[in-house]
Image (cartoon, grey):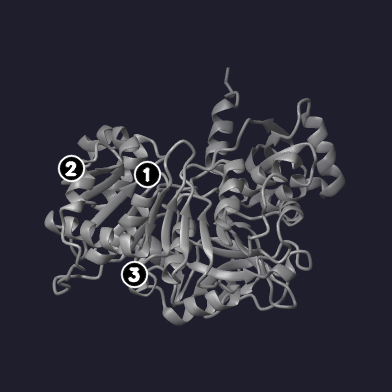
């Protein structure tokens, strides 16, 4: 559609330091996507075929998302940060028969080929040019797809982060509901002339999903190949970026740059920054608001499985600290307590369940896990939440992350929010660890903001801002926190490392 209405408008801009800028217009993107779709069809790709793609953000990755849709196949993003064992699991579990991979990650694919016997074809882009030559030789007309053999297994399958176990393939078997999507777009105020920047990997449902919305609206999508905070500011200024979707860590890095660095760049074009992927503390929001337009910050709560579920507008961040907003258009939310009873009183916690047309269809090869997280038409990803008198929701924490110490329920997110405001800390994560006396105790992992920060400094600050039973019993300092590609802290890894380092008791 946009190729016909605005053929000469930039659709994709791939601007990396040290390389020529690559710009494809909507007409060029349409032509290339048609050609790649024909090439995929020529090697047997069609409806229900799983096509796995891998690489850092680039124009060819955006191209692949459009071509896979055109040929009717199932799009399976592969996190390029995975170890060979992890990557082999995702590729084989997904039943992908085609891999479309950046040449930079060809060694990763080579390392797992003996464990991915279902893969028939590996297409390598940005390498020696052979794939690009094959694409150019294909017809430019749209592909005609025969849907008669389709079993509707899905249009996309995104593997969850795997923070609590092996990742699961979240299958979506239909396009996004137009009315629900339109309600969200209208609420946030997206415009056809917006310019979207990928602050995060396209394989994640947030950056990739909002890039899809941007192209559906005819927006220019600017892909940052590899995140760098100052280069991000350069891109925002150069292309007058108006909107993005981001996890907390990139913004923390940007706002922590020296004032003289930030002042080199015009940031006034930003109109709609979507905060998500992991909770944003009030302290981080204040950092952002000090550097960017006050009416540009939006927060959404959602997940790979459930889509966008709540929205918090710019006017509410300081008025409703800690809230993730009210239900998005077309979304129904219910809370259920541990006895399965619906929570109807404000400020009482319960597990959050969602019903919407944006939800996923099932977990691939794990239907039992899908059913276990379902109540009728409502589904959960295990978050504990409450709502206030005005109907604003607050995520207390992940069900699996809750700490029970001495019979008290402790939510790490509350402790993390308090410690995040400490001038001594750049970033912090809190985990429950086994304790012979209390059952579990609170342990913190912290990235110091300066040299010389001690455990006593952190604990003293915590005692000033938290109830005694919430104060960490120990603090481990690290150079960085382990995270998934979407920006979530891998608390399971921290807990496992803690347990591995504990002295083992011995018996006489």
- Residue at 78 percent across and 47 percent down: it is 421
Residue annotated with mark 1: 55
Q: Where is residue 101 in the image (x, y as percent from the top left)?
A: 30, 44
Mark positioned earlier in the residue sequence (1 or 2): 1
Q: In this view, does 469 lie above or below 366?
A: above
Residue annotated with mark 2: 117
As drawn, which residue projects farthest toward the front?
Answer: 8
Pair 2/3: label in front: 3
Q: Please indicate whether residue 114 sits to the left or right of residue 388 in the image.
A: left
Pair 3/1: label in front: 3
Q: Quadrant of residue 70?
A: bottom left
Mark positioned earlier in the residue sequence (2 or 3): 3
Q: Position of residue 438 (x, y in %)?
A: 70, 42
Looking at the rendered structure, the secondary structure element under dot 2 is: loop
Residue annotated with mark 3: 3
**Is any atom of residue 137 visible in this view?**
yes
Looking at the rendered structure, the secondary structure element under dot 3 is: helix
Instruction: Specify the quadrant that holds the C terminus.
Output: top right
């Amino acid at each position: 559609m946009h190729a016909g209405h605005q053929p000469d408008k930039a659709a994709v801009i791939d601007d990396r330091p040290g390389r020529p800028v690559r710009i494809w217009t909507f007409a060029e993107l349409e032509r290339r996507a048609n050609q790649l779709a024909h090439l995929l069809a020529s090697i047997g790709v069609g409806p229900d075929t799983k096509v796995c793609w891998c690489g850092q953000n680039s124009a060819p990755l955006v191209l692949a998302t459009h071509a896979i849709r055109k040929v009717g196949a199932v799009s399976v993003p592969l996190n390029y940060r995975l170890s060979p064992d992890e990557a082999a699991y995702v590729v084989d579990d997904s039943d992908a028969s085609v891999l479309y991979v950046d040449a930079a990650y060809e060694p990763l694919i080579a390392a797992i080929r003996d464990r991915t016997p279902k893969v028939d074809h590996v297409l390598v882009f940005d390498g020696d040019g052979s794939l690009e030559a094959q694409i150019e030789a294909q017809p430019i007309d749209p592909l005609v797809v025969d849907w008669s053999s389709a079993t509707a297994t899905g249009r996309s399958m995104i593997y969850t982060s795997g923070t609590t176990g092996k990742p699961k393939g979240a299958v979506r078997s239909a396009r996004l509901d137009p009315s629900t999507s339109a309600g969200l777009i209208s609420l946030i105020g997206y415009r056809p002339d917006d310019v979207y920047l990928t602050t995060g990997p396209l394989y994640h449902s947030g950056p990739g999903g909002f890039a899809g919305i941007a192209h559906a609206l005819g927006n220019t999508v600017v892909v940052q190949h590899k995140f760098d905070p100052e280069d991000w500011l350069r891109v925002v200024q150069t292309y007058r970026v108006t909107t993005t979707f981001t996890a907390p860590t990139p913004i923390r890095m940007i706002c922590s740059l020296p004032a003289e660095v930030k002042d080199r760049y015009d940031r006034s074009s930003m109109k709609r920054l979507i905060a998500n992927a992991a909770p944003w503390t009030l302290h981080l929001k204040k950092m952002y608001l000090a550097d960017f337009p006050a009416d540009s910050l939006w927060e959404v709560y959602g997940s790979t499985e459930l889509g966008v579920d709540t929205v918090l507008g710019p006017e509410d961040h300081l008025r409703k600290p800690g809230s993730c907003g009210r239900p998005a258009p077309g979304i129904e939310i219910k809370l259920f307590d541990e006895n399965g009873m619906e929570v109807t009183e404000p400020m009482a916690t319960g597990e959050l369940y969602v019903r919407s047309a944006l939800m996923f269809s099932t977990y691939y090869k794990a239907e039992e896990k899908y059913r276990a997280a379902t109540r009728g038409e409502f589904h959960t990803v295990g978050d504990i939440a409450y709502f206030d008198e005005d109907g604003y929701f607050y995520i207390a924490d992940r069900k699996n992350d809750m700490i029970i110490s001495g019979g008290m329920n402790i939510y790490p997110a509350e402790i993390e929010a308090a410690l995040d405001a400490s001038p001594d800390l750049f970033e912090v994560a809190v985990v429950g660890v086994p304790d012979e006396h209390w059952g579990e105790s609170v342990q913190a992992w912290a990235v110091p903001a300066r040299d010389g920060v001690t455990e006593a400094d952190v604990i003293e600050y915590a005692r000033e801002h938290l109830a005694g039973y919430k104060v960490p019993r120990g603090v481990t300092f690290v150079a960085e926190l382990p995270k998934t590609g979407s920006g979530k802290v891998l608390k399971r890894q921290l807990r496992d490392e803690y347990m591995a380092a504990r002295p083992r008791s011995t018996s006489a």
